[in-house]
Amino acid sequence: MENVTLNPKEQNRLQVLNEVNLGRLRVKQAAILMKVSLRHTRRLLAGYRKEGAKALAHGNRGHLPYNTLDVALREQVVELAKTKYKGFNQQHLSEKLNEKEGLPLSRSTVRRILLKEGIVSPRQRRAAKHRSRRERYPRSGMLLQTDGSPHDWLEGRGPTLCLIGAIDDATNEVPYACFQPQENSAGYIRMLKSITLSHGIPLALYHDQHSIFKVNPGKIPTIEEQLAGKRPQTQLGRILEELGINSIAAKSPQAKGRVERLWGTFQDRLVSELRLAGATTEKEANRVLSQFLPDYNRRFSVQAKEPGSVYRQPKSDFKADEIFCYKYTCAVGLDNVVKLGQQRLQILPTAHRPSYARCRVEVQVGLDNTLAIYYEGQPLKTRPAPLEASGLRKQSTMPSLPNNPKQPSQEPSFNPWRQWVYR
C-alpha cells in the first residue's frame, strides 16, 4: 500500500470526511467545516471513497515544476561562472551565456543559481543613504532656500518662463517670487535686493550648485586674486560676501526639499490661477503672482518655533545700488578712457587727481545698465567718450536684426561671467 503524507489542512479534511462516511455529519455541514463549496465537498468525498486518503493530497505533490532547470544545466552555469566567466556580474554573465553558450537564461534565473551556490556579484553597490527630515530653523530669517523653476507656467498661451523665488525655512513664508524669461544672476540679485529692502538681510542662503552661485573649482584665479589671497567669485557670490550672508550649496535636490515642494505647490495652484486670469505674457503673470503670494503666505505659512526675527536691518548709510550690481575691475587708458565692451567712458579730472591714466578702477553696472566708475571707493565724474575708428566701422557694418528677434535676456548688456580687465 502506497504511503501518503498529508499536511495539517488535508488531515482535517480526512477527519471530516470520515465523519460523513460514518453518518455523523451531513455533506452540507462538512462543506462548512472545511470552508469549501458544497460541489467541491462532493468531489472530495467521491475521490476519497474511490482512492482513499491519496485523493486528498494535491496532484502535483512530488512532481517537479515544468519549468525547473535541469541539474546538469545548473551545474554548467555554476562551472562557467567559476572558470571562463569568473568576475562577470550577473547581467553580463546572463548575456554571455545567451550569446556564446546558447543558454537563454534570464538574469533573475542566473542570479538565483549563483546565490544558491554562494557566488555573489563582484560589483559592490553603494548602500542607500538614510535620509531623515531635518528640523526647521527656529527663527525666521536664519535660512532662506532659493531656486529657479523653469516651467510652462502659461500652458502654451505665452512664452516659457522661469520663476525665481525663496522660502523661509522657519515659517514657510515666501518673501519673494518673480517670473522672468530664464534663470540668471540678475534674477537672484533682484531677489536679494527686494528681500533686503522689505525684510532685511538673512543669515544664510541655501541654494543648488549652479554656476550662478559658485565658480567652477577648476577655474584658475587671476593675478589680482592670487595676490589678494582670494578665491574666484561669481557676481552673486561677491554680493553675498559683501552682505555677510552665508552661502550654503546643497548636494542634492532632496536637501533643499522645502523649496522643491514649494514649486510643486505653485505648479498646481499658481498655474490654475494663471489659467483663470487668462495670463499670456510675463507682465500679466507677475501681476497674478503679486496677488497670489499674500494669499499663499496666509494659508501655508507656519509659526516659527521661537518668536522674533533675525533679519539684519541695513545701516542708515546703506546704498543698495552700490551692492546689488555687477562690478568689474578695469585699467584706465592713457587718455583717461575706460573701455567696457562697446562702451567708452571718459573720466573727468577731479580736485584730488587731474589724471587717472593707468589706474585700476571699479566699474559698476546696475541692473538697468547704468554705469558708474569708482576709484578707491570714491565715485568719479564721467561722460561718454567717442568710439575709435574700429568701433565706428563695426557699427556701420552691423547686420540688421531679423524680423523675429530672439527674446532678450534680462542680463545686463555686459556679460557678467567675463572678467573685464583691460590693459
Image (cartoon, rainbow, N blue to C red):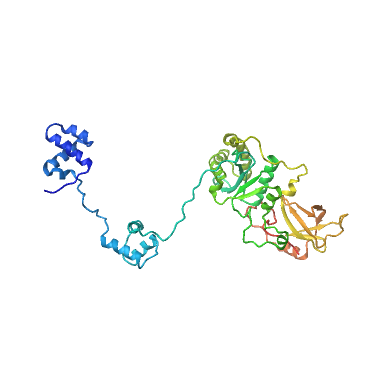
On screen, 176 above or below 411? above
The single residue placed furthest to the right in the displayed view is 351
Does residue 186 appear in the picture of this structure? yes
| Horizontal and vertical percent position of residue 125 | 45, 56
Count of picture labels: 0
Q: Nearer the viewer, residue 91 or 138?
A: 138
Does residue 411 appear in the picture of this structure? no
Q: Is residue 300 left or right of residue 413?
A: left
**Image quarter (top left, top right, bottom left or bottom right) of the C terminus:** bottom right
On screen, 341 above or below 199? below
| Horizontal and vertical percent position of residue 34 | 21, 36
Q: Residue at x 38, y 60 (%)?
A: 90
Residue 313 lies in quadrant: top right
Q: Nearer the viewer, residue 70 or 127?
A: 127
| Horizontal and vertical percent position of residue 282 | 62, 45
On screen, 139 above or below 160? above
| Horizontal and vertical percent position of residue 210 | 60, 53
On screen, 62 above or below 45? below
Q: Nearer the viewer, residue 5 or 382?
A: 5
